[in-house]
Amino acid sequence: MRQITSATFISLDGVVQAPGGPAEDPTGGFTFGGWTATYWDDVMGKAMGENFAKPFDLLLGRKTYEIFAGHWPHQQADDPVRKVFDAATKYVATRTLKHFDWVNTKSLGNDVVASLKAIKAGAGPDLLIQGSSDLVQTLLAQDLIDQISLWIFPVTLGKGKRFFGKGTLPGAFKLTQSLASTTGVVIATYKRDGAVKIGDFQDPNPSEEELARRAKLV
């Protein structure tokens, strides 16, 4: 089965909107577009390169697809990111776009969840979500994201689109990798790890019966 990973730039207060530039996504009066740009260093560049080193397909929301399609195909042909993005199949969640100029692009159709379940069950490389905050909300609500890579920037933004929205399901995650850049960015990778595990500091070793009782109260 193919795995879905979401790689996301996120502020300390959970905002993911418009990390790349002022014109990226000003919806809702957001004025901090480009809030990640001044933190980039060689550590982050190396980590990004490692993320792109193995085969993957891209999973994108419409807005992120349009941003990427307006940029990467127009870079030099030998640009390493362009080369891997061109080679990847781009699956796009959209009901409005019917024609795609970027090579290897496919629509997920009207039923995004059903399409992704079928794609996950098939053969092929893992799927990498870049940005696409609206699509992420849909996938979190359906528990379809297997791994989350959070690039946590040392900044608070106050308002804006957030990674974990109202549709987020309760669930546990396991930290599998972490790294800090010279500019204070923490790159933390988490994999799904079953249900939320509850406890009690007054009773550090509860019985299975007590755990089951508490689970019913949640």
Image (cartoon, rainbow, N blue to C red):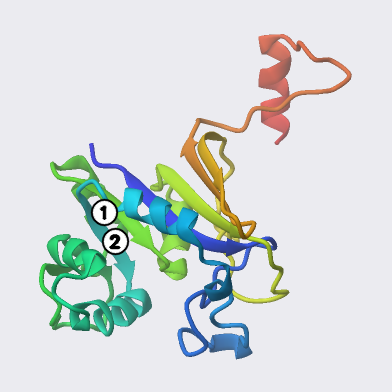
Alpha-carbon neighbours of circle 2 within 10 Å: few (<14), some, or many (≥20)?
many
- The type of residue carrying mark 1 is Leu
- Separation of marks 1 and 2 at Cα, in angstroms: 9 Å
- The type of residue carrying mark 2 is Leu
Residue displayed at 25% across by 80% down? 69
Quarter of the figure with the N terminus: top left
Residue displayed at 33% across by 48% down? 50
Helix, strand, or loop for circle 2? strand
Q: Is residue 185 left or right of residue 73?
A: right
Alpha-carbon neighbours of circle 1 within 10 Å: few (<14), some, or many (≥20)?
many
User: Circle 2 is placed at which residue position?
Assistant: 59
User: Circle 1 is placed at which residue position?
Assistant: 116
Q: Nearer the viewer, residue 8 or 119?
A: 8
Q: Position of residue 15 (x, y in %)?
A: 61, 68
Examine the image and state in which quarter residue 105 appears.
bottom left
Q: Is residue 117 left or right of residue 101?
A: right
Examine the image and state in which quarter residue 120 appears.
top left
Any part of residue 174 in sight: yes
Q: Is residue 188 left or right of residue 52?
A: right
Q: Position of residue 112 (x, y in %)?
A: 29, 62
